[in-house]
Image: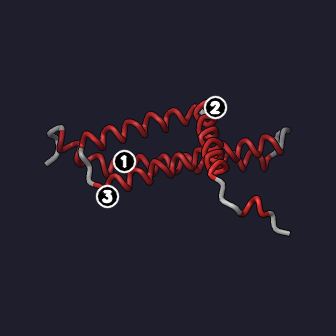
């Protein structure tokens, strides 16, 4: 039998789902030290991009890149929580799950640095007079 209450649109439920999502974001910022590094880097990149007056396509790439790092950090935190909840005692596979999730964040962050250098580097060097 179909649950009709789940199939109807409810603005209240949509707003509640946003509240849950923002609670998750606050949790990550409160508990994950590397999230603060991502936050500072995000703000610096946005400020630098504004100062350099980057074109829309460069903005799109930077936003997608920053978003990918944040998504990896959120998923890493979620995986760590699920592993800790399901495996309170140390287990080799629990370590693998947590290490691989952390590696995903590292790969995303390293890629973001490279993309940032490619997009921000040339106009920054030109702006400070070092570019040709």
Return the residue at label 3. Answer: 57
Residue at label 1? 116
Secondary structure beneath label 3: helix
Tell me which residue sits at (18%, 37%) in the image.
128
Question: Counting other residues with Cα less than 10 Å from the Cα at mark 3, is it few (<14), some (14-19), or many (20 or more)?
Answer: few
Indicate left or right for 111 with 122 as reference.
Answer: right
Residue wearing tag 2: 31
- Drawn side of residue 115 relative to residue 81, left or right: left
Judge whether residue 102 can be spotted in this image: no
Q: Is residue 60 visible?
A: yes
* Other-residue count near label 2 (Cα within 10 Å), few / some / many at <14 / 14–19 / ≥20: few
The quarter holding residue 46 reads: top left
* CA distance separating discs 2 and 1: 26 Å
Relative to 130, 18 lies left or right: right
Q: Nearer the viewer, mark 2 or mark 1?
A: 2
The residue depicted at 76 percent of the width and 59 percent of the height is: 5
């Amino acid at each position: 039998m179909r649950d009709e209450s789940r199939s109807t649109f409810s603005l209240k439920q949509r707003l509640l789902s946003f509240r849950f999502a923002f609670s998750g974001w606050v949790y990550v910022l409160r508990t994950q030290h590397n999230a603060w590094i991502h936050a500072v880097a995000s703000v610096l990149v946005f400020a630098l991009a504004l100062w350099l007056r980057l074109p829309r396509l460069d903005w799109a790439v930077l936003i997608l890149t920053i978003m990918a790092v944040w998504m990896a950090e959120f998923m890493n935190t979620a995986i760590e929580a699920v592993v800790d909840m399901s495996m309170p005692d140390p287990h080799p596979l629990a370590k693998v799950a947590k290490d691989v999730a952390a590696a995903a964040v590292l790969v995303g962050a390293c890629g973001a640095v490279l993309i940032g250098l490619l997009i921000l580097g040339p106009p920054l060097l030109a702006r400070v007079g070092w570019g040709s």
